[in-house]
């Protein structure tokens, strides 16, 4: 059964409390992938959670992080974090999406969001932080509305087709989305990560190890996103011909994956 990043982080946190992990002990991505049998994306997310809680920090020259000096006290006092956004924060994100849909991402500003909500320009910042933080929340909210299929198709190829076509339609519906989403492990938001984890699990179920499966998932996601960006940059809204080109490219990509699958 696939492990979640929150589960891995919880077990690492417990190891700090029990003394199994000490100050400056290394937490490497590869060790986590091996010990918990998870993809690189899950390992990155787990360590990012540890970093956000002050339990781990990045050190130059290490492919991962190390346990911080205050980790024991922080882990001992740890309590589940409250939701990142309040009801008003969710309204800020939804308003930003509506404005970006109407006028494009370049026209989006905190001033316009404040005017739409009837609050001061600086008020939204208290709920979303930076402009980059707002864009990440916007992307995550959209991906939350399009979760991976509950009942996967039979076979790895059909499963990847299903997910890639879903993402393609999302980018066709919102031209700005492909330019904003990131599939880099260090920048993944929860619901974007869910797409990658679903694809990774689909490939792992057909014989690939965790790391090659995660690479296949990331490559497929980047293909869909890159194709959508190219079409939007050249001609604006996608056409039926563009979809035909996408389908041709998708099939050739999957042909390339086929020799990897047992």
Image (cartoon, rainbow, N blue to C red):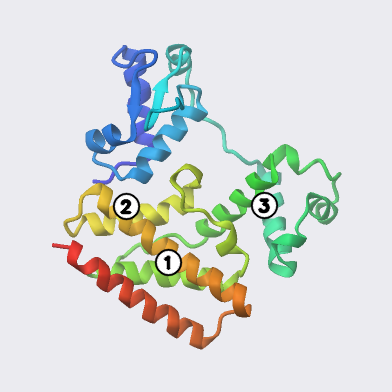
Of the numbered discs in the image, which one, if any, rests on residue 223? Answer: 1
Crowd band around label 2 with a 10 angstrom C-alpha radius: few (<14), some (14–19), many (20+): many
**Residue at which label 3 appears:** 93
Residue that lies at the very extreme toward the front in this rendered image = 61
Q: Nearer the viewer, residue 60 or 147?
A: 60
Residue 261 spot, x, y in % from top left: 18, 63
Q: Residue at x 55, y 85 (%)?
A: 239
Task: Calculate the distance from the C-alpha at mark 3 to the C-alpha at mark 2.
Answer: 29 Å
**Residue at which label 2 appears:** 214
Q: Is residue 174 above or below residue 111?
A: below
Residue 3 spot, x, y in % from top left: 30, 41
Q: Residue at x 81, y 52 (%)?
A: 117
> Disc 2 vs disc 1: which is toward the camera?
1
> Quadrant of the rendered structure where residue 30 is?
top left
**SS at circle 3:** helix
Name the N-terminal-most of marks 2 and 1: 2
**SS at circle 1:** helix
Q: Which corner quadrant holds the C terminus?
A: bottom left
Task: Calculate the distance from the C-alpha at mark 1 to the C-alpha at mark 3.
Answer: 27 Å
**SS at circle 2:** helix
Q: Residue at x 34, y 44 (%)?
A: 40
Q: Is residue 153 visible?
A: no
Name the N-terminal-most of marks 1 and 3: 3
Name the N-terminal-most of marks 3 and 2: 3
Q: Tell me if 141 is positioned left or right of 98 in this view.
A: left
Q: Tell me if 113 is positioned left or right of 14 in this view.
A: right
Crowd band around label 3 with a 10 angstrom C-alpha radius: few (<14), some (14–19), many (20+): many
């Amino acid at each position: 059964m696939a492990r979640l990043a929150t589960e891995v982080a919880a077990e690492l946190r417990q190891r700090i409390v029990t003394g199994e992990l000490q100050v400056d002990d290394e937490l490497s991505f590869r060790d986590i992938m091996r010990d918990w049998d998870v993809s690189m994306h899950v390992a990155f997310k787990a360590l990012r959670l540890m970093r956000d809680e002050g339990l781990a920090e990045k050190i130059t020259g290490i492919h991962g992080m190390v346990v911080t000096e205050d980790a024991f006290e922080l882990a001992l006092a740890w309590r589940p974090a409250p939701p990142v956004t309040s009801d008003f924060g969710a309204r800020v994100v939804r308003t930003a999406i509506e404005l970006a849909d109407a006028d494009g991402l370049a026209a989006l500003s905190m001033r316009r969001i404040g005017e739409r909500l009837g609050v001061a320009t600086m008020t939204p910042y208290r709920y979303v932080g930076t402009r980059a933080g707002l864009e990440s929340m916007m992307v995550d909210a959209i991906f939350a509305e399009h979760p991976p299929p509950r009942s996967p198709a039979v076979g790895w190829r059909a499963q990847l087709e299903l997910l890639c076509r879903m993402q393609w339609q999302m980018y066709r519906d919102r031209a700005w989305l492909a330019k904003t989403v990131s599939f880099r492990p260090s920048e993944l938001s929860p619901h974007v990560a869910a797409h990658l984890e679903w694809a990774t699990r689909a490939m792992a179920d057909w014989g690939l190890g965790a790391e090659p499966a995660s690479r296949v998932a990331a490559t497929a996601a980047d293909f869909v996103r890159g194709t959508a960006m190219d079409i939007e940059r050249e001609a604006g809204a996608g056409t039926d011909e563009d979809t035909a080109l996408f389908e041709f490219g998708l099939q050739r990509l999957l042909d390339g994956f086929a020799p990897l699958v047992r």
